[in-house]
C-alpha cells in the first residue's frame, strides 16, 4: 500500500489572499512512475490513487481519517512564513 502525505495548502503565488490555506490535504504518494501513452504521448500510469486529494479542516482530522482507514502517512510541516516589508517609496529610490 502506498504511503500518504498530509500537508497544509500553501498560499497561492498568483494572488495576495490567503484563502483556504488553513485546510489540510491528504494526498497519496505515486506508487508507480508515469509512462508515455504510445498513441497520444500523454504521461499516465495505472495508479488511480494519485488522482485522489482529500481536504480536512484540521491536522487531527486528517490523521484520524488515515488511522481509521489504515493508511500509512507522514506529515509535511508547513514552511515558515516570511514577510518582506517594503514601503511604496522604496520603488523610487
Image (cartoon, grey):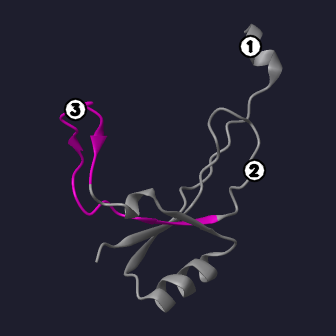
Q: Name the secondary structure under disc 3.
A: loop
Residue 4 position by quadrant: bottom left
The residue at 75%/17% (across/down) is 90
Compared with residue 92, is residue 84 higher up or lower down, i.e. above or below? below
- State the image coordinates of residue 78 (x, y, percent, origin top left): 55, 60
Along the line of sight, the residue nearer the viewer: 93 or 33:
33
Along the line of sight, the residue nearer the viewer: 91 or 54:
54
User: Which badge, 2 or 3, is on the more N-terminal residue?
Assistant: 2
- State the image coordinates of residue 43 (x, y, percent, origin top left): 28, 39
Residue 40 badge: none
Q: Is residue 33 magenta?
A: yes
The residue at 39%/64% (across/down) is 49
The magenta-colored residue range is 24-45
Are the residues tagged 2 and 1 within 8 Å (C-beta)?
no
The residue at 74%/36% (across/down) is 16
Mark 3 — residue? 39
Residue 91 badge: 1
Residue 59 position by quadrant: bottom right
User: Which badge, 1 or 3, is on the more N-terminal residue?
Assistant: 3
**Residue furthest front in the image:** 39
**Residue furthest bottom in the image:** 68
**Residue furthest top in the image:** 92
Mark 2 — residue? 19
Q: Nearer the viewer, mark 1 or mark 3?
A: 3
Are the residues tagged 1 and 3 within 8 Å (C-beta)?
no
- Mark 1, other Cα within 10 Å: few <14 / some 14–19 / many ≥20: few
Along the line of sight, the residue nearer the viewer: 54 or 92:
54
- Left or right placement of residue 60 versus residue 48 in this view: right
Q: Nearer the viewer, mark 2 or mark 3?
A: 3
- State the image coordinates of residue 39 (x, y, percent, origin top left): 22, 32
Amino acid at each position: 500500500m502506498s504511503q500518504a502525505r498530509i500537508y497544509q495548502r500553501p498560499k497561492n503565488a498568483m494572488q495576495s489572499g490567503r484563502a483556504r490555506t488553513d485546510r489540510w490535504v491528504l494526498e497519496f504518494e505515486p506508487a508507480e512512475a508515469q509512462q508515455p501513452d504510445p498513441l497520444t504521448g500523454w504521461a499516465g500510469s495505472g495508479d488511480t490513487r494519485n488522482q485522489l486529494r482529500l481536504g480536512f479542516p484540521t491536522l487531527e482530522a486528517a490523521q484520524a481519517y488515515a488511522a481509521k482507514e489504515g493508511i500509512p502517512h507522514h506529515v509535511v510541516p508547513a514552511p515558515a512564513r516570511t514577510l518582506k516589508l517594503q514601503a511604496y517609496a522604496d520603488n523610487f529610490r
